[in-house]
């Protein structure tokens, strides 16, 4: 028996092409909704700094206390703290800002094993898409402080670097806290990537390394530039 068009339809009677088109429209509406929510929620946040870092560090660790102190120092300077809203370094930075009476923002992401929004967030939203989440990070921050982290932290770090490099966003400070942790990455960028002509020296110099939390805060709050 020859194949007929019924084999190209789903249970609702739509062809695969029609079904995919409907799915794309639904996806577009969800993306639009996330952007609308984020823009409405964060437009009046005021000067703010994003703090990135690992979700896997635990309360009481040196890295957790660093994040907490950073949040406090930023709040004391009148800056909101924006994080991914999760546990670990994100919770620590939000906690420091919250305890200092500052604005503590969490922009979360829906993941199968995500632990949810930490309890120290005063303004929050959850995103389905990573790209809408990262847009909120860059759109509403005046600088970035990056604590030791893994793949997600690296993704956020290089997203910011690429946007600044390509002039898709205004120049802003990108401070890496943890000289011992980040030096290997910077050495590789200098000695392998830059030497092979794939990036310029100014791209590497955009990353500022320090172990001094007060210096990190001073650098990122020295100018206010957004998209």
Image (tube, rainbow, N blue to C red):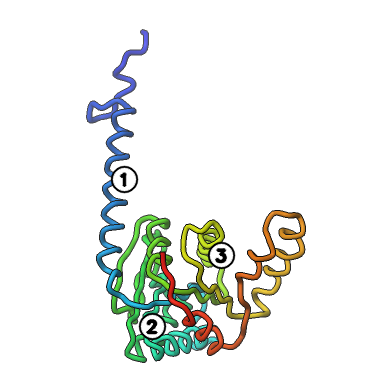
As displayed, is residue 26 above or below residue 149? above
**The N terminus lies in which quarter of the figure?**
top left
The residue singled out by tag 1 in the image is: 27
Q: CA distance from mark 2 to mark 3?
A: 24 Å
Res 174 → quadrant:
bottom right
Quick check: marks 2 and 1 in contact, CB under 8 Å? no
As displayed, is residue 34 above or below residue 12? below
Q: Position of residue 70 (x, y in %)?
A: 47, 86
Q: CA distance from mark 2 to mark 1?
A: 34 Å
**Which residue is most to the top?**
1
Residue sitting nearer the eye, 76 or 3: 76
Q: CA distance from mark 3 to mark 1?
A: 27 Å
The residue singled out by tag 2 in the image is: 79
Secondary structure under tag 3 reads: helix
The residue singled out by tag 3 in the image is: 154
Residue sitting nearer the eye, 89 or 83: 83
Please identify, in this view, whether the residue under mark 2 or under mark 1 is nearer the observer.
Answer: 2
């Amino acid at each position: 028996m020859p194949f007929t068009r019924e084999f190209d339809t789903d249970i609702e009677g739509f062809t695969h092409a029609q079904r995919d088109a409907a799915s794309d429209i639904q996806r577009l509406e969800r993306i639009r909704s996330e952007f609308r929510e984020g823009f409405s929620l964060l437009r009046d946040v005021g000067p703010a700094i994003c703090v990135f870092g690992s979700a896997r560090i635990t309360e009481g660790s040196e890295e957790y206390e660093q994040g907490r102190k950073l949040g406090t120092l930023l709040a004391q300077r009148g800056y909101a703290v924006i994080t991914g809203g999760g546990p670990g370094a994100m919770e620590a930075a939000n906690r420091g800002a919250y305890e200092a009476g500052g604005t503590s923002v969490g922009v979360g992401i829906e993941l199968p094993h995500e632990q949810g929004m930490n309890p120290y967030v005063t303004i929050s939203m959850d995103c389905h898409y990573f790209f809408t989440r990262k847009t909120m990070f860059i759109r509403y921050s005046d600088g970035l402080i990056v604590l030791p982290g893994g793949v997600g932290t690296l993704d956020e770090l290089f997203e910011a670097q690429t946007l600044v490099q390509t002039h898709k966003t205004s120049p802003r400070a990108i401070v890496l806290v943890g000289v011992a942790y980040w030096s290997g990455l910077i050495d590789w960028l200098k000695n392998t990537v830059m030497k092979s002509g794939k990036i310029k020296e100014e791209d590497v110099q955009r990353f500022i390394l320090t172990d001094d939390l007060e210096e990190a805060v001073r650098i990122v709050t020295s100018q206010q530039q957004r998209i």
